[in-house]
Image: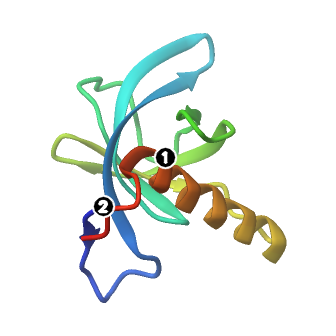
Amino acid sequence: MPLVADSGRRYERHVIDQPARAIIGDNEYQTVVHEIAVGDAAIVTSHAMFANDQFFQLHMAGHEPMKVRIVRELPNGFAIEFEQLDDKKEREKRKAEILAFREIVMGHETY
């Protein structure tokens, strides 16, 4: 799985290009999680109805639904931040889920 090199980032980012669903109220939108890290992700979508600071539920195979917030627009989508977890055990659980998801999606290949 390609690792996105950027020493200014708080968490390692990984390119996964995995389909996902964004649930806003009663509406569901198909998206793609392009890059993911423990605290945030980059989402690709053709839908223009998203706005900064908007919250929604992100559903990806292999993960429990996650509450996320849009933090900025990107050329082909937007950047999201996962709900802040105050509990260290919960942060470690999320990190383990993301690492397990990487293994499911990409196998054991390392780039």
Confirm whether residue 87 shows in the render: no
How far is disc 2 from disc 1 in space, using C-alphas? 11 Å
Considering every residue shown, the one lying at the far top of the view is 26
Q: Note whether 18 is above or below 53 in the view shown.
A: above
Q: Nearer the viewer, residue 1 or 74?
A: 1
What kind of residue is marked 1? Ile
Q: Nearer the viewer, residue 111 or 9?
A: 111
Colour scheme employed for the rendering of this structure:
rainbow
Residue 33 drawn at (x, y percent): 37, 43
Residue 4 drawn at (x, y percent): 26, 71
What residue is at 58 percent from the left and 46 percent from the top? Answer: 68
What kind of residue is marked 2? Met
Q: Which residue is mark 2?
A: 1
Q: Nearer the viewer, residue 108 or 71?
A: 108
Q: Residues within 10 Å of mark 1 (few under 14, many from 20)?
A: few
Is disc 2 in contact with disc 1, using a CB cutoff of under 8 Å? Answer: no
What residue is at 48 percent from the left and 25 percent from the top? Answer: 21
Q: Which residue is mark 1?
A: 104
Snapshot quadrant of residue 71: bottom left
Residue 64 shown left or right of residue 11 in the figure: right
Residue 93 drawn at (x, y percent): 74, 63
What residue is at 31 percent from the left and 69 percent from the top? Answer: 110
Quarter of the image where the C terminus is located: bottom left
What residue is at 29 percent from the left and 23 percent from the top? Answer: 47
Residue 26 shown left or right of residue 88 in the figure: left
Residue 31 drawn at (x, y percent): 36, 29
Quarter of the image where the N terminus is located: bottom left
